[in-house]
Image (cartoon, grey):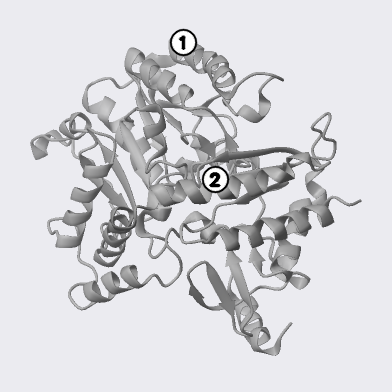
Amino acid sequence: MNESNASYVARDLAHVWHPCTQMKDHEHLPLVPIRRGRGVWLEDFAGRRYLDAVSSWWVNLFGHANPRINAAIAAQLEELEHVILAGFTHEPVIALSEALVKVAPAGLTRCFYADNGSSAVEVAAKMSFHYWRNLGRTAKRRFISLANSYHGETLGALALGDVELYKATYQPLLMDVRVVGSPDCFERAPGATWAEHSTLKFALMEAALARHHEETAAVIVEPLVQCAGSMRMYDPVYLSLLRQACDRYEVHLIADEVAVGFGRTGTLFACEQAAIRPDLLCLSKGLTGGYLPLSVVMTTDAVYAAFYDEYVKMNAFLHSHSYTGNALACAAARASLAIFDADGVLAKNRTLAAHMGARAHALADHAHVAEVRQRGMIVAIELVKDKATREPYPWQERRGLRVYRHSLARGVLLRPIGNVVYFMPPYVITPEEIDLMVTVAEEGIEKATCD
């Protein structure tokens, strides 16, 4: 390790406990201390650069140190950094709420703020449960989610998810959630289209709602892409069918767009591709352009009205975070949203996505690639031990880690999920940088599967 980086690594390992990490790995897998970022590039203390192909855990939209978001935060810093949002308000949270209502699916008119994606999911679940309670329908206290889903790691959000890696250890602490089969199109029969498979799998959800709707408050889904669930994808028709069923059975639909919102799937919100409006929409990650922690749950006037009453009725939604509606975070989010319009981002992303998809699909013929799949600015490459049977590599072999290590050596930050290599870069990436990203991934896949 370069001496310029080594001192920072030593200081870190003396005190910092990193997320989603077996810390013992760092006895042989060096940490990478980052000094600064510019655009899609990160730079360590030795001057080595890394292309951020995963948007620093899917949060960065418009590059590191974006001048317009920097300026918005700097200007806000001179006026107000934070104030309690109970009994007080401020211009950044008002302006952001107005902007979100303009671009969100029609009818989502109310914004409740929190600090992160998991917290947004907690808010949505509590809000749905409490809504039915306020209406006197106290039996509606259960939730339905999809197999292989991920909704965060606080206890309520963790209970709503289904990725065993995160959930199994804490199962004794979690509420009981009903899980139905996923419309994941990796599992489709030979010759079946995505729409056909997703429609077929909806029968499982239809049966669950038919049987359990009286006790169900809400169904929660990640629209179109189950990101932490190995980037598995499904067709928008599933969301259309789900919206119809939730209306029919009087059950809320919670759309967790924490990871897939703000242009990741090709539209500003993934739900748009099914032309639906959820009852509660959870947003975070890209909300501030990757700058500061902030999340929001958007909902309807009908949900809001169920809590609007005389104080003595005790119907208010009593949920709070100290940094709710933080002024600096709201300023960053407002600046990030403005860039979409000013730069025609979604149209430009279609061109970038087409280039990224064309380059990545060249890997489909690799002997150990089962599928290359794409939804907008998300591309995933599924590695398998046997292409014919789709037998996966044993997780203990950590094939994805081999890709990660190779990519770092080549100046690209890829962070596979198990045996799935994926690209989710900032929207300011160039075609030439996409070429580098895919080339390095191809090299890493070859090294990881050569034995």
Q: Residues within 10 Å of mark 2 (few under 14, many from 20)?
A: some
Q: As displayed, is residue 415 above or below residue 203?
A: below
Q: Give the farthest residue toward the bottom.
A: 3
Which label's residue is closer to the chain start, 2 or 1? 1
What is the quadrant of the N terminus in the image? Answer: bottom right
Disc ID at residue 211: 1
Vertical order, 17 against 135 (above or below): below
Q: Secondary structure at mark 1?
A: helix
Query: Residue 366: percent from the left, percent from the top?
Result: 80, 43
Mark 2 → mark 1, Cα distance in angstroms? 43 Å
Identity of the residue drawn at 23% across and 21% down: 136
Residue 154 in sight in this render: no
Label 2 sits on residue? 354
Give the residue type at disc 2.
Answer: Ala
Furthest-right residue in view?
Answer: 451
Image x and y of residue 117, in percent: 42, 49
Q: Residue at x 26, y 29 (%)?
A: 131
Query: What is the x, y in percent for residue 441?
Result: 71, 56
The number of discs equals 2
Looking at the picture, tell me which residue is in the foreground, 269 or 393: 269
Say which element carries label 2. Answer: helix
Which residue is depicted at the point 49% across and 48% down? 351
- Residue 260 vs 345, above or below: the answer is above
The circle drawn on residue 203 is none
2 and 1 marks in contact (CB < 8 Å): no
Q: Amino acid at mark 1?
A: Arg
Nearer-the-camera pick, 53 or 225? 53
Name the spot of residue 429 as percent of width and height, x first.
51, 61
Q: Nearer the viewer, residue 267 or 156?
A: 267
Left or right: where does residue 64 sit relative to residue 288?
A: right
Query: Which of the two marks, 2 or 1, is nearer to us in this view?
Result: 2
